[in-house]
Amino acid sequence: MVRHDWTLAEAQALYDLPFPELIFRAQTLHRENFPGFQVQRSTLLSIKTGGCPENCKYCPQSAHHDTDVERHKLLSKEVVLAEAKEAQAAGSTRFCMGAAWREVRDGVEFERVLELVEGVSSMGMEVCCTLGMLTADQAKRLKAAGCHAYNHNLDTSPEYYDKIITTRTYEDRLNTLRNVRAAGITVCCGGIVGMGEGVADRLGLLLELARQDPHPESVPINMLVRVEGTPLASQDAVDPLEFVRLIATARVMMPSSYVRLSAGRKQMSDEMQALCFIAGANSVFAGDKLLTTPNPEVDQDEALLQRLGMSFLNQPSTTSAKVANG
Ligand code: SAM
Ligand code: DTB
Ligand code: SF4
């Protein structure tokens, strides 16, 4: 049963279960909702990089931090469509375009983004965008251009939010999420682990996500990529088992959402990723780059899934066919 009224005490009780029990519950719900041992993947492209006016402490693209991210203006249609074609040829069916903007502004640049969305969508790929805050009208125009999903993260609990970002509020983020939902675009919303927050903040984020009705179709759980020059560069590493517990708790609280193992995979062992898949993660970003930081190569991901007898969605591997046929 899909619920929207989880309490912190309930989430904490789940999270604190003996590890095998928590994984068992998550895996049981996972199989009911997503049979087939498959992992969905999408390719990310940063269409406008760096120089962002927001002060998100984790982000290498914020103009408030001195990082060595190479800034670039909005990419041309030719470049973006060529990247999308390459991703499609490599097996990706979903293409996500990200821009280092605080919000979308009406004008020439937004018109160009709408053209990009139309272009990629007419290639037969599912288009996802993450462009910062949106008005209701902008969300409707993105939908009309063929945008399937919009990524807009709440990042952490409402209580911890202003320790990380002060140039916008939690309510601003919720407002954009409402505009996206009202326009009929599917919601991709999650957060980051490893910014100095406590377990209650991580669970507080899950409560906020689960409170939404319907639940976000996609829930990215990022492990902080500690980038030199950002205020969070020297945070402690996340305990892998705590991370797996959070994935499992997300799976139980939002049983029919795609739980996306997002940033930080390059820093995870194969065994940690395997545990995340067992705990209910069923989606990843594919390709050797996220927006500005490295991500595992496609070949590496394919080799890992092969070893696990799993496959990418839309690309059944021989191993998983064998398993499925007994
Ligand atoms: N500017 C838009 C926005 O903030 O919504 C879109 C791009 S922004 C880079 C997308 C998401 O990437 C952020 O919400 C954050 O959750 C995640 N992110 C950014 N930097 C990260 C980092 N160093 N480690 C992990 N996740 C990160
Ligand atoms: C999300 O939650 N993670 C992706 C995607 N949404 C846009 C971005 C991760 C960015 C990690 C840091 C970087 O590469 O710049
Ligand atoms: Fe800008 Fe998005 Fe980075 Fe925040 S997370 S600084 S809004 S690009």
Image (cartoon, rainbow, N blue to C red):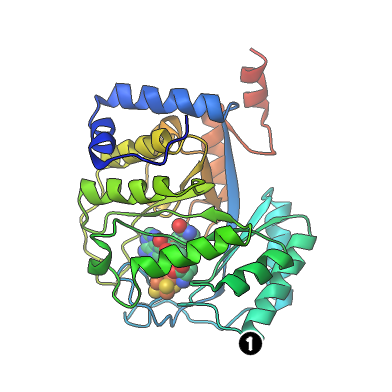
Instruction: Give the residue drawn at x 72%, y 62%.
Output: 146
The crowding category of the residue bearing disc 1, from other C-alpha atoms within 10 Å (few below 14, some 14 to 19, many at least 20), is few
* Residue 121: percent from left, percent from top: 74, 61
Q: Nearer the viewer, residue 124 or 147?
A: 147
Give 223 or 305, whichever is nearer the viewer: 223
Residue at 49%, 29% in the rendered image: 30
Which residue type carries mark 1?
Answer: Gly
- Quarter where residue 124 is shown: bottom right
Image coordinates of residue 163 in percent, x first then y, are 22, 67
Q: In this view, which residue lies farthest toward the top?
A: 326
**Would you place residue 140 above or below residue 262 in this image?**
below
Callout 1: helix, strand or loop? loop
- Looking at the image, residue 231 lies above or below residue 29: below
Residue 293 visible, this angle: no
> Residue sitting at 43 percent across and 80 percent down?
52
* Above or below, 135 relative to 189: below
Q: Is residue 53 visible?
A: yes
Front-lying residue, 55 or 287: 55
Left or right: 143, with 218 as reference point: right
Q: Position of residue 27 (x, y in %)?
A: 44, 26
Image quadrant containing the C terminus = top right
Image location of residue 197, percent across then percent down: 22, 55
Q: Which residue was labeled with disc 1?
A: 107
